[in-house]
Image (tube, helix red, strand yellow):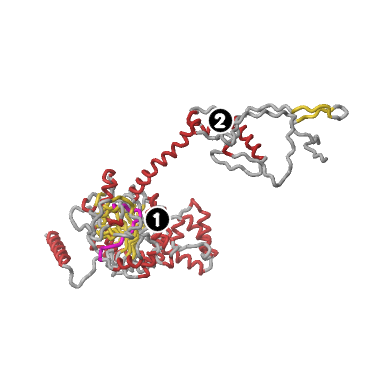
């Protein structure tokens, strides 16, 4: 017989008994241990009882909501209550169990041991929780905890529908009436007419062809097509819808937005103005066109003034100048073309170190003073590279001094920094404002594409920070001229991607116009809300777009449609747009009869064939013909006669 010591006493007796020893060390009596019953809740005692019962079995009992915890009255396998078992005396020992591997222990079914732990009827009856142990099962607690769950189940569909209505970028007229946009006075603009709506199985022609753009919600649109397909016309129509208020012919806009257009060309005497600037020139009476302000480089100021002179007095050309307070550390990194610090030259690493040390206390003067100290240790090649990178930024900064000069008809004076020869106007016009279209035209033979992207990035960041108390729209015009696949990770590209991802929080609408869609990063195509594809015939362009569009159509059939589009027509993809479609698109008859069962839903994987509406402002992008169209010749004759009449009046 082996005796195992238990505890410090070394006794082999069960722990439920205590020994009384005499002075001789013999056991004189064995008495049951007196355990004081603790005040424990029946639920806790039931858990403990179940643990004791299940611990003797070799197979665990699966737990479910119907799993029973032990209670004082058990039940038989038939469900009848068992008689209470007599309690064993403390000195009654259980008979030894024979060890036999072939005999499995008897385990009573889990569902037949005790009463269920959770009874909903009892929980509802317990209006007030009498014990903290059952607070989770109290009816009042249940009501509080289920309150928001019920609101989610009941109102989730309504909330999602409201969000779909508010965030839909494109809306057909039928959906506008069905959804009740008119009751909420939602601003919209007439974009064009729907020729047909295609799905994988059928085509549907709406009764009312009007297509609206929701100017109240942020969105991102990519507009592509070859020259002469109507791409710039579509962009100008979108700008009209966002900048011309209270004109019933083009929609319902109560408050104009603030617009920014990024434009880059070859520069020189033969330059052409940005086609977006013609939004400031009305083509009919009663049109309140926005104020157009064009910012150009100081070196091409006089040339660009002559380029934009035919547009009239509503289009103002001023030099692009930055104040010291407008520039931050990121602006220096943008102008110095610092992409990755790992591959940057040594002097760029020193510049980055200075910027990190200055931190939030950065200022242009402190930075230049620290840089002058560090330049003493540079070799001539490093100094030349640094000066070359800073020269462009300094040429676009205002300076401080008593001198002044005159460019054109305005006098400019130095007003802020000591390091530049650029002169600032005495009354600097506001760069961004509600109801104003700001165009940054860097068409200059002395500015390359990399420098233009750096300046565009600075201006875009200033536009995001500007407080205009209205929505904003950014137009990346002719993106193929300065965005490139080789510069896919440039600062401007990353800035546009950031705007696209955060457009809802910034109240920003982004429109990217390009002849070559391959320059648009694939990530941006995945994030865009609306894709408008005018006519083009390049299979490579279509392959680039087809991998990132959601239309559920045959690739070959869709490409054939793009090639055959007429001028002004476009394929429009807007998965979150709203329209009214047949409930079962399979029931469309071959005769073209319109099904009577219609429902409002999102476009999803459908696509639209749209024709853009006519403009209410002049179109400056028309093709130059040898023999002009009859209407164009009549308009030119009328304008010439008006100019002659005005000259005669001035001479008198």
Residue 4 appears anywhere in the view: yes
Residue 440 appears anywhere in the view: no
Q: In the rendered image, which residue does mark 2 sit on?
A: 132
Q: Where is residue 266 drawn, in percent x and y?
A: 33, 69
For the N terminus, the image quarter is top right
In this view, the mark in front (1 or 2): 2
**Left or right: 355 in relation to 438:** right
- Between 8 and 244, the one nearer to me in the picture: 8
Q: Where is residue 283 drawn, in percent x and y?
A: 20, 58
Circle 2 crowding by C-alpha within 10 Å: few under 14, some 14–19, many from 20: few
In three-dimensional space, the C-alpha distance between marks 1 and 2, rounded to whole angstroms, equals 51 Å
- Between 528 and 339, the one nearer to me in the picture: 528
Say what secondary structure mark 2 lies in: helix
In the rendered image, the vertical position of residue 440 relative to residue 146, given as above or below: below
Circle 1 crowding by C-alpha within 10 Å: few under 14, some 14–19, many from 20: many
Q: Please name the residue shown 37% across and 70% down the image.
A: 540
Q: In the rendered image, which residue does mark 1 sit on?
A: 500
Q: Please name the residue shown 44% across and 55% down the image.
A: 328
Q: Which portion, as a residue range, is magenta? A: 566-581
Exactly how many numbered labels are in the figure?
A: 2
In the rendered image, the vertical position of residue 515 relative to residue 410, given as above or below: below
Q: Please name the residue shown 53% across and 65% down the image.
A: 346
Location of residue 225 (image quadrant): bottom left
Say what secondary structure mark 1 lies in: helix
Mark number for residue 236?
A: none
Q: Where is residue 282 drawn, in percent x and y?
A: 21, 57
């Amino acid at each position: 017989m082996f005796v195992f010591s238990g505890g410090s006493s070394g006794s082999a007796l069960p722990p439920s008994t205590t020994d009384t020893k005499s002075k001789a060390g013999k056991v004189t009596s064995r008495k049951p241990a007196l355990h004081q019953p603790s005040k424990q809740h029946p639920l806790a005692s039931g858990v403990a009882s179940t643990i004791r019962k299940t611990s003797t079995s070799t197979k665990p009992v699966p737990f479910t909501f119907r799993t029973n915890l032990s209670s004082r009255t058990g039940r038989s396998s038939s469900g009848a209550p068992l008689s209470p078992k007599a309690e064993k005396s403390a000195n009654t020992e259980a008979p030894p169990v024979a060890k036999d591997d072939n005999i499995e222990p008897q385990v009573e079914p889990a569902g037949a041991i005790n009463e269920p732990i959770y009874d909903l009827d009892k929980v509802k009856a317990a209006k007030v929780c009498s014990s903290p142990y059952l607070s989770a099962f109290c009816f009042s607690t249940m009501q509080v905890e289920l309150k928001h769950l019920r609101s989610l189940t009941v109102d989730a569909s309504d909330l999602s529908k409201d969000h779909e209505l508010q965030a839909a970028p494109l809306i057909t007229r039928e959906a506008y009436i069905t959804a009740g946009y008119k009751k909420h006075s939602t601003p919209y603009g007439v974009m064009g007419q729907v020729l047909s709506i295609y799905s994988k199985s059928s085509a549907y022609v709406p009764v009312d062809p009007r297509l609206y753009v929701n100017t109240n919600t942020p969105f991102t649109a990519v507009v592509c097509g070859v020259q002469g397909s109507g791409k710039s016309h579509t962009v100008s129509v979108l700008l009209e819808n966002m900048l011309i208020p209270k004109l019933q012919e083009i929609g319902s806009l109560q408050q104009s937005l603030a617009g920014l257009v990024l434009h880059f060309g070859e520069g020189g005497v033969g330059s052409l103005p940005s086609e977006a600037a013609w939004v400031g020139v009305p083509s009919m009476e009663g049109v309140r066109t926005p104020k157009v302000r064009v910012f150009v480089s100081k070196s091409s100021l006089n040339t660009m003034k002559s380029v934009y002179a035919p547009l009239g007095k509503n289009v103002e050309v001023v030099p692009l100048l930055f104040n010291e307070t407008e520039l931050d550390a990121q602006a220096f990194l943008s102008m110095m073309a610092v992409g990755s610090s790992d591959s940057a030259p040594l002097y760029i690493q020193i510049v980055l170190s200075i910027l990190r040390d200055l931190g939030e206390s950065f200022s242009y003067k402190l930075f230049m003073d620290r840089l002058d100290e560090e330049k003493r240790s540079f070799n001539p090649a490093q100094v030349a590279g640094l000066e070359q990178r800073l020269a462009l930024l300094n040429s676009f900064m205002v300076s401080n001094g008593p001198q002044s000069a005159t460019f054109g008809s305005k006098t400019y004076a130095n007003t802020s920094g000591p390091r530049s020869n650029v002169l600032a106007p005495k009354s600097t016009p506001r760069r961004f404002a509600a109801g104003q279209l700001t165009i940054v035209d860097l068409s200059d033979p002395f500015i390359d594409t990399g420098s233009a992207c750096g300046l565009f990035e600075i201006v875009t960041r200033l536009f995001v920070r500007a407080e205009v108390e209205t929505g904003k729209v950014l137009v990346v015009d002719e993106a193929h001229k300065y965005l490139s696949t080789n510069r896919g990770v440039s600062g401007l590209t990353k800035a546009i991607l950031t705007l696209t991802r955060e457009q809802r929080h910034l109240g920003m609408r982004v429109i990217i116009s390009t002849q070559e869609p391959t320059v648009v990063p694939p990530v941006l195509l995945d994030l865009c809300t609306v894709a408008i594809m005018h006519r083009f015939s390049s299979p490579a362009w279509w392959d680039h777009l087809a991998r990132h569009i959601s239309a559920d159509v045959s690739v070959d059939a869709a490409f054939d449609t793009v090639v055959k589009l007429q001028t002004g027509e476009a394929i429009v993809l807007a998965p979150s747009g709203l329209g009214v479609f047949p409930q079962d698109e399979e029931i469309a008859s071959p005769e073209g009869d319109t099904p009577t069962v219609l429902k409002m839903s999102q476009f999803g994987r459908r696509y639209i064939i749209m024709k853009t509406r006519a403009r209410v402002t002049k179109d400056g992008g028309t093709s130059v013909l040898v023999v002009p169209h009859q209407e164009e010749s009549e308009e030119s004759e009328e304008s010439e006669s008006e100019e002659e009449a005005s000259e005669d009046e001035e001479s008198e």
